[in-house]
Amino acid sequence: MIRSECLKLKNSSGLYLVFLFTLLEVLTIPIYLAFGRSSVSMTDLSLMTLLFFPLLAAILSILTFEQESLANHFQEIKANKKTSRIWLSKLVVVDLLLFFPSAMIWLITGISQGKGGEGLLIASASWLMAIFLNHFHLLLTFVLNRGGNIIVAIVEILLIVFASNKVLLGAYWCPVALPVNFVVTGGFNYLMAVVIWIVLCTLIIVSLPKNAIR
């Protein structure tokens, strides 16, 4: 199933979107930190890039959902007895794809700046943020239209701004703030909480009945 989902991504708009975003990061972030004269640190810059993740995840989720909708109105999924495995495969494939604009960029940046440890921590937080948003926004596609999904993404951007200013420290009810809190404070409990939210969203998606597909 995972192989099938990978083939569906070939030449897809979602694939091009992720690689375009990754290319822009690779061409700007390491170079900016290497030659920039401002006092912006790697941590501060990572918080700025996290602002784009909600919209990226929302668009990818919408494209994933609509791809299946255009394919005979979800007939393949509805006719398959392993619906949960299909959705899980879709999540895993996009999660792996999101490694590039989230984790890879900060691993490269950390190594290039001689701060591999910091780069690894930021990469972990960024990837978990991307994974959670992917799962959450795919779940939203079952109940919201495209406009509603994008509106939620905009609200998440505002929450990330608040979290970067330490307004949402300890707010475990706000999963989108947890990776930001980790970057700001270094508390690994925030990363563990994000993992719990990811598992929760995943369980809900794979447990949804077939008639939940609109």
Image (cartoon, grey):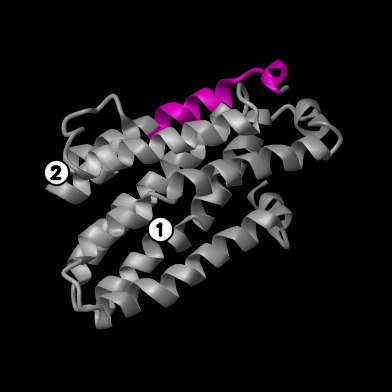
Q: Toward the viewer: 188 or 56?
A: 56
On the image, which quarter does residue 173 sit in? Answer: top left
On the image, which quarter does residue 124 sit in? Answer: bottom left
Write down the residue under mark 1: 102
Give the farthest residue toward the front. Answer: 38
Q: Is residue 36 above or below residue 14?
A: below
What residue is at 70 percent from the left and 20 percent from the top? 210
Q: Is residue 209 left or right of residue 124?
A: right
Q: Is residue 195 in view from this perspective?
A: no
How would you rate the neighbour count of disc 2 (Cα within 10 Å): few for under 14, some for 14-19, many for 20 or more?
Answer: few
- Residue 177 pos. (x, y %): 29, 37
Write down the residue under mark 2: 187
Q: Which mark is residue 59?
A: none
- Residue type, label 1: Ser
Residue at mark 1 to residue at mark 2: CA–CA distance: 19 Å
The main secondary structure of the magenta stretch is helix
What residue is at 30 percent from the left and 73 percent from the top? 109
Q: Toward the viewer: 170 or 41?
A: 41
The magenta segment: 198-213
How many discs appear? 2
Query: Which of the two discs, 1 and 2, labels the residue nearer the N terminus?
Result: 1
Q: Toward the viewer: 104 or 169?
A: 169
Q: Is residue 26 left or right of residue 92?
A: left
Q: Is residue 162 left or right of residue 185?
A: right
Q: Is residue 153 in view from this perspective?
A: yes
